């Protein structure tokens, strides 16, 4: 028995020795090879760059636009180079970018009047597939979408629901003996005449009638104020008849009577805004951006004295509840250039800039989103949303034609010649129509 135990102990000792030696000789686990740091999941576009062009004029002002862009950079890791230009400089720069092998600008703001041209020439990408995937389309009115549709496709995401409104100085109005703003063109002219006669203000009206696109916009709403449009349903010019003639005759008459400031002939929209918020005129028409600035004590001398209302129409077309006002659309979208190298990132930026939460925070511009317009929080913060809603429903559009820049240039030229009294209104409009028809 003792021999057996000794033998078992010896075998066990040998086994333990073998196991110990075997463990000591076993290969150690290989050390893990260091890996390249992966992009953070929440910054999928880190290292990429976008170039964006936007106007520094009407619409969201540059500080607001820049702040939103900075948030996008922080969120995505992308770098965004932002270029601000005057509205009149945008078209040429975009066309030049479109002709380059690599886009100078990846994302642009697209005025509705460029939709047909840019689509025909392939300057921008159709966005329908991306919109269908990412956007609640029925939360934007069809009238706004239609501004950016051409040949059955959508070429920009709605961004600015811009349109013109009527601005008036209540203090000057009361001095002239009036408690309410005019509802008709005839009442407006009567009030301006009274102000002029009493010496309350030298020029009651000041506007942006320089020989630029803004002049066409002014002429479009004034033609609407007399119950007409500048082009017919088939896209043919009709402004040398009826309402179009009355509109230009009114502009000329206001200049002749000293009711409209002659500086209007060299002013753009920001200059017209400055004339109003400095208290130098009683009335003007302008885009929505003027409302916020006229109520800013840092810049305005008419805080508490100025109001925004509906543009008047002629008494023979005024119909309560159906035709009480007329305006002009200036809708703008954000579009992706066809020659961009970063279409996915560009679309992410377009979505970011046009998002409803951004527009809900900046009610100085009319939101394109119906849900934002009707949100009780919006209505509580914006006491003039009802005025805006009525005015936007009464907009008249400029023609959607592929050669719009040439058409607009002709209109600007001859309307301005009439304002300068170098041509009679009817003769100027007849010649404009003749030259536009020759473009066809």
Image (cartoon, rainbow, N blue to C red):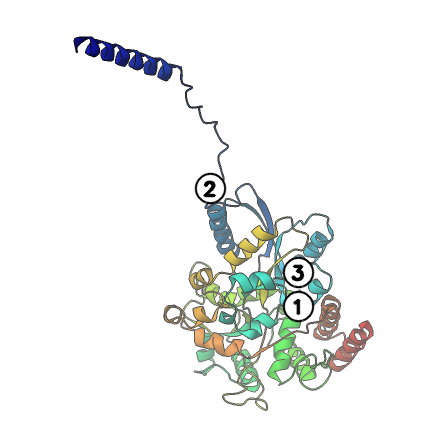
Task: Residue 12: name its quadrant.
Answer: top left
In the displayed structure, 332 sits above or below 253; it is above
Element marked by disc 1: helix
Q: Decide: few, some or many residues near mark 1? Use Cα within 10 Å; few <14, some 14-19, many ≥20.
A: many
Q: Decide: few, some or many residues near mark 3? Use Cα within 10 Å; few <14, some 14-19, many ≥20.
A: few
- Give the residue number, with chain letter if any, for mark 1: 113
Q: Looking at the image, is mark 1 or mark 3 nearer the viewer?
A: 1
Quadrant of the image containing the C terminus = bottom right
> Distance between the Cα atoms at labels 1 and 3?
13 Å
Q: Which mark is residue 88?
A: 3
Element marked by disc 3: helix
On the rendered structure, is 330 left or right of 382? right
> Distance between the Cα atoms at labels 2 and 1?
41 Å
N-terminal-most mark, 2 or 1: 2
Which x, y percent locates residue 267? 62, 65
N-terminal-most mark, 1 or 3: 3
Q: Extreme front residue here? A: 1
**Quick check: can you spot residue 299?**
yes
CB under 8 Å between callouts 1 and 3? no
- Give the residue number, with chain letter if any, for mark 2: 40
The residue shown at (56%, 63%) is: 131
Which x, y percent locates residue 287? 55, 69
On the rendered structure, is 316 left or right of 151? left
On the rendered structure, is 199 left or right of 209? left
N-terminal-most mark, 3 or 2: 2
In the displayed structure, 229 sits above or below 34; it is below
The residue shown at (71%, 60%) is: 122
Q: Decide: few, some or many residues near mark 2? Use Cα within 10 Å; few <14, some 14-19, many ≥20.
A: few
Quadrant of the image containing the N terminus = top left
In the displayed structure, 73 sits above or below 241; it is above
């Amino acid at each position: 028995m003792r021999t057996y135990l000794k033998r078992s102990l010896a075998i066990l000792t040998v086994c333990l020795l073998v196991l110990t030696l075997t463990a000591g000789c076993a290969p150690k686990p290989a050390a893990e090879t260091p890996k390249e740091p992966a992009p953070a999941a929440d910054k999928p576009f880190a290292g990429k760059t976008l170039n964006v062009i936007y106007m520094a004029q009407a619409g969201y002002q540059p500080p607001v636009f820049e702040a939103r862009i900075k948030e996008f950079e922080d969120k995505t890791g992308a770098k965004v180079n932002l270029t601000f230009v005057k509205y009149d400089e945008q078209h040429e720069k975009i066309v030049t970018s479109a002709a380059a092998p690599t886009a100078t600008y990846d994302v642009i703001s697209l005025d509705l009047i460029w939709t047909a041209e840019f689509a025909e020439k392939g300057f921008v990408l159709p966005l329908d597939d991306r919109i269908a995937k990412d956007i609640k389309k029925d939360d934007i009115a069809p009238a706004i979408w239609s501004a950016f549709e051409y040949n059955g496709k959508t070429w920009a995401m709605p961004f600015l629901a811009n349109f013109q409104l009527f601005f008036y100085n209540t203090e000057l109005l009361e001095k002239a003996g009036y408690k309410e703003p005019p509802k008709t063109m005839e009442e407006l002219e009567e009030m301006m005449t009274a102000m002029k006669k009493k010496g309350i203000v030298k020029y009651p009206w000041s506007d942006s009638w320089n020989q630029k696109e803004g002049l066409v916009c002014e002429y479009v709403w004034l033609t609407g104020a007399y119950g007409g449009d500048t082009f017919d349903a088939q896209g043919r010019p009709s402004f040398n008849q009826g309402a179009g003639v009355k509109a230009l005759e009114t502009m000329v008459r206001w200049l002749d009577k000293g009711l409209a400031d002659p500086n209007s002939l060299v002013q753009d929209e920001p200059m017209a805004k400055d004339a109003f918020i400095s208290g130098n005129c009683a009335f003007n028409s302008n885009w929505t951006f003027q409302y916020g600035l006229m109520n800013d004590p840092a810049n305005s001398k008419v805080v508490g004295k100025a109001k925004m209302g509906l543009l008047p129409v002629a008494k023979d077309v005024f119909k309560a509840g159906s035709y009480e006002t007329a305006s002009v659309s200036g809708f703008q979208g954000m579009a992706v250039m066809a020659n961009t190298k970063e279409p996915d990132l560009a679309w992410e930026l377009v979505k970011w800039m046009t998002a409803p939460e951004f527009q809900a925070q900046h009610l100085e511009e009319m939101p394109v989103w119906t849900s934002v317009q009707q949100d009780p929080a919006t209505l509580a913060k914006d006491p003039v949303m009802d005025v805006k809603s009525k005015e936007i429903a009464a907009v008249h559009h400029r023609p959607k034609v592929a050669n719009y820049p040439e058409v607009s240039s002709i209109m600007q030229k001859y309307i301005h010649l009439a304002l300068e009294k170098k041509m009679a209104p009817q003769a100027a409009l007849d010649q404009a129509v003749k030259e536009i028809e020759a473009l066809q």
